[in-house]
Every structure is written in structure tokens, then in C-alpha cells.
Image (tube, helix red, strand yellow):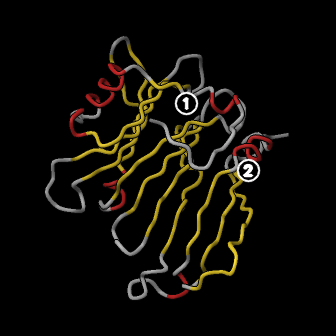
Amino acid sequence: MVRYLGFAALPAVLLAALIPVRADTAADAYGAMGIKAADVLSGSVVAARVLPGEAKQVVAMVTYFTGKKDDASAVDVRLEVFRKDGNALVEVYSRDFGNENGGFVGRGDLELLDLDGDGVSEIVVSYDQLSNPLVQRRSGEVIVHEPSGFRVAWTGDLEYDATRAARDVPQDRRDRFVRKLDPGATIRTHGITLFMTKKVIAVAGERLPEPKEVKETFPLRPAPAP
């Protein structure tokens, strides 16, 4: 299923893209990715407009057993965007997060959100990074489509807790925080600025008396020419 990363009470315009596909289409997506349905740990397969035009694409974020025996690559997380060509699914965009991170990934999730109000959804993905068992880390990306193709507009940690990793992580990086997107504030800028709320719980290994919330902004798209 499609999970939500703290997106409470999303406006209807943002939810309109979240249309789970039929079971046979999900099976077709797994097949096009070369993944056996029996190996799927979790999968989000959604029909939505992520490219300009009236047609909907099929977007799949799949966590699955690879069949490999080593701990690093036994589980992988992949993202695929397909367009339909008759009964066939044709790959448009592909990411292999296990390969990109040297393995040790898991629990991939997908959200499709129209953050600029143009009727085309941006792709928001998240997944666990598990290389250090003492560090809880969940990474995320916001992927936008431009005339040149898909582009990663933002990447960073949505959850991070290194407070237990006294030997492996320098003290100034032993923080703990949770970061959430603010889609309402983002859409009010027509998708030019990405807004996030970062709740800081610990800094340099020391827990704060009270969690501190920080409003963050990041460039998402260039402003249109006047």
C-alpha cells in the first residue's frame, strides 16, 4: 500500500493521484521488474499522472528478496515508472536504491503528491538504510519531472538517530531528529519551495529538555521567468 510520511489531512488535490492499481497490473509491474510476486516483502503500485499529458503512468516502489545470500544485498528496494503501450509496460525511469547505497536497504515507501498544482504528481520515496545497526536512518527523496526528464530535487534523512553509536559516529553527528514534508506550505509556493518541519530530539548525543521544531525550506523548482 501507499504509506504517508506524516501527511495528516492532505488536501483533496494532493490525494487525487493515489489510485492503487488492480492486482493483475501489480503483477505485471513485478514481472516487468523481473521480480517474482512470492519474493515481494512490500510493494506500492499506483496509477497516476507523473508525466505531462492525460495518460496515467504506473509507478512501483518494491521491497523484495533478491535471492542473494549476503546480508548487504539479500533485500533490495527499487522504484520504477512505466508508461503503458497496449498491454505492455515500458520503463520510463528506474532507481535501484540497494545498488546506489551498497546494499543494506529496506522498507521502501511511495507517495505521489501534486506539490505545484499542475495536475502532475511529484514522486516522494523513502527507505531504511541499515548498514549500521546502531544508527536508525530513513532516507527520502522528492523527484520532479522537467522537460529533460526526472530529477531528484531533494534528498536527505527523514528519520535519524545516532545517539547509541558512541564508537562509530563522531559526537557532533550523534543527533536524533524526524523530518516531515509540509505539502500545504509547498503548494502555496506553486512548488517552487519545498517546506519541511524538522523535530530535533537530541544533539551531539545529548537529549534536549524539549524537542525543538525547526522550519526548513529547500529549492524545489526554479521560479518561472517573468
State the residue at coordinates (62%, 26%).
16
Residue 67, above or below 161: above
Q: Within 10 Å of the Cα at label 1, are there few (<14), some (14-19), or many (20+) other Cα atoms?
A: many
Q: Nearer the viewer, residue 161 or 56?
A: 161
Q: Are marks 2 and 1 in contact (CB under 8 Å)?
A: no
Look at label 2 and name its amino acid.
Answer: Thr
Q: Residue 159 at what x, y percent from top left?
A: 53, 63
Q: Residue 123 at what x, y percent from top left?
A: 54, 40
Q: Within 10 Å of the Cα at label 2, are there few (<14), some (14-19), or many (20+) other Cα atoms?
A: many
State the residue at coordinates (68%, 38%).
10
Check the picture and name the quadrant holding the C terminus. top right
Residue 72 figure quarter: bottom left
**Relative side of 99 to 109, left or right:** left
Check the picture and name the quadrant holding the N terminus. top left
Q: Name the disc covering residue 148, or none.
A: none
Q: Name the disc covering residue 193, or none.
A: 2
Look at label 1 and name its amino acid.
Answer: Val
How many numbered marks have been drawn onto this rendered protein structure? 2
**Relative side of 178 to 161, left or right:** right
Judging from the image, what secondary structure is the residue with disc 2 in? strand
Residue 66, above or below 175: above
Residue 223 figure quarter: top right
Q: Nearer the viewer, residue 34 or 167?
A: 167
What residue did someone put label 1 on? 50
**Relative side of 29 to 110, left or right:** left
State the residue at coordinates (73%, 67%).
214
Q: Which callout, 2 or 1, points at the residue further toward the start of the chain?
A: 1
Judging from the image, what secondary structure is the residue with disc 1 in? loop
